[in-house]
Amino acid sequence: PEDIYKSHLIEGRVPTSTTVSSARQNLASSFVNAFVNAGFGHDKLLTETTEGDGTVNWIFKNRERGKMSAAASLGMIMMWDVAGGLPQIDKYLYSTDSHVVAGALLAVGIINTNVHDECDPAFALLSDSVNKDGSSIRIGAIMGLGLAYAGTCKEDVQELLLPLLGDEQTPMEVAGFAAVAIGLVFLGSAQEECCESILQALMMRPEHQLKDPFAHFMVLGLGLLFLGKGDAVDATIEVAKALNTEIAHYCELMLDVCAYATTGNVLKVQAFLSKCTEVTENEELSEGKKGLPFSIAVLGIAAVAMGEELGSEMVHRSLEHLLQYGEAPIRKAVPLALALLNMSSPTILATDVLSRLSHDADLEVAQNAVLALGLVAAGTNNARVAGTLRQLSSYYYKEPDVLFLVRIAQGLVHLGKGLITLTPEHSDRGLLSLESLAGIFCVLFSCLDMKSSILGKHAYILYFLTVAMRANILVTVDEEGKALPVPVRVGKAVDIVGQAGRPKTITGFQTHTTPVLLNVGERAELATSKYLPMTTVLEGVVILKKNPDYVEGD
């Protein structure tokens, strides 16, 4: 992690260990280490400590819930490697410390994220722990299941988790994570039983429990079931109006935001904007938890517009207005909205606004802006953003909370050493992955209440980003699946819609041999006619077949 912080380059005051508690520092290092070495299979903190040489294992240098995050970070380092990763984690599953066990269970889920394995190890390992004592173990298992089976609609998970929601004895935090896990597994399926169970649970809970931040997680779980569904959500919104007044308004907006996400529906953007003006007219609404629905409306504007380029450019302008005239709950959501629009693509427009907001007088705005900087530059190794974050670490040397977020943002910028991206768009920005979007949503919505989520005991919420992580490299293989290095041209993508003839699709290209890195906004094309690609878009793993008409010396 010290290689990432580069403290020696900082001018001014370096954060010293007396101002920052060592446990907090270690927790930040665990996350940075996990993000930087994601999917590499080895690192210097966790996998290299050998047993019996007298050194204390890194995991035990953290306090309570910190141990859970540290143990789970091992899962991220071993990401996508089911056969090699599970034996490494196995020893922690039998630990006497419940937080370490919880982290190991979460790590099992992280390893199985976006991987389809025939023997299905995740369900076998995690299902028994869902009903154990101790909420941290239960949360670890539940969140692990949610990550491992995101978007698969696996019914065994439903049978396992729905009873938790129906039982009033279940602690609110466990119920909240269970709802989000169900939302992730049955993503955008509008599955009736799950909707009914979550709504039922929200109706049964007494009012004081609905004030708990994790009641909002239950609502998020409900929203994820309708992600991108559009009109199908109307009936559920009517039911939501009948809920307790504490949460009804929040629930309606959340369902609306999720259902119309990425649709580019202009009427919805207008509706959310007019929602934001309500706070300015009625100042009582901006205090405390009452302001949360308005923060969600701001995220909603970004979520709806992120599907198309023109819409998102216009929304950038609207967000500027909200910054100038909006009340506190609206302003604190603007950095997160910018992050959603520019995931893993550090445009100068976005990074400028965010670096300005990261020095804001309102600490909540500054915290969200710092994390948003990390998300916008995630996996790009962007030197400009990395420099900004280094300055911020000396600026906030007395604020342990913000410093913690600066560290995490630094880890995100170097995500997977620059080989992993978080953007939900793929296939030349033509398609959006709902699973990626859901993972990003989980993190952004929990940022609206930082104190009780990421800065509180639940820092491991950041691991929801694993669903959105994918390698931004282009690998070419032959028809048998063996690697096949070929020359490709990589350049900035040009929009050629509606142009006559065969215009050039890329500009300013360089020729490389695969495998190559593709950053956001870049496109690749084959530089040889010896092979023909099986797909129109060159991205991820591409199968090539020999061109039968190819003549040597062409």
Image (cartoon, helix red, strand yellow):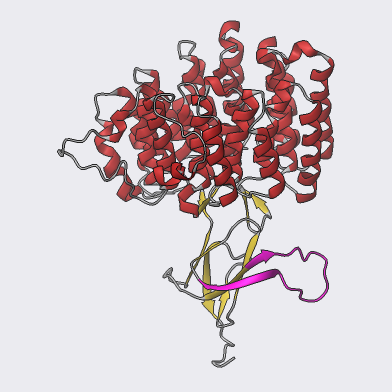
- For this orientation, the residue located farthest to the left is 52
Image quadrant in which you'd find residue 59: top left
Total labels: the figure holds 0
Q: Quadrant of the C terminus?
A: bottom right
Q: Quadrant of the N terminus?
A: top left
Give, as a single range, the part of the protein colored magenta. 491-513
What x and y, as percent, mark residue 267? Answer: 84, 35
Position of 384 with respect to 274 (left or right) is left
What x and y, as percent, mark residue 117? Answer: 39, 49
Residue sitting at 30 percent across and 50 percent down?
A: 84
Image quadrant in which you'd find residue 87: top left
Residue 1: tell me if it is visible. no
Q: Is residue 129 above or below residue 382?
A: above
Q: Is residue 496 magenta?
A: yes
Q: Is residue 517 above or below residue 345?
A: below
Residue sitting at 70 percent across and 69 percent down?
A: 507
What x and y, as percent, mark residue 67? Answer: 35, 28
Residue sitting at 56 percent across and 36 percent down?
A: 392
In front: 30, or 504?
Answer: 30
Q: Is residue 153 magenta?
A: no
- For this orientation, the residue located farthest to the front is 12
Residue 387: tell me if it is visible. yes
What x and y, as percent, mark residue 297? Answer: 73, 28
Position of 6 with respect to 180 (left or right) is left
Residue sitting at 58 percent across and 42 percent down?
A: 388
Position of 43 with respect to 251 (left or right) is left
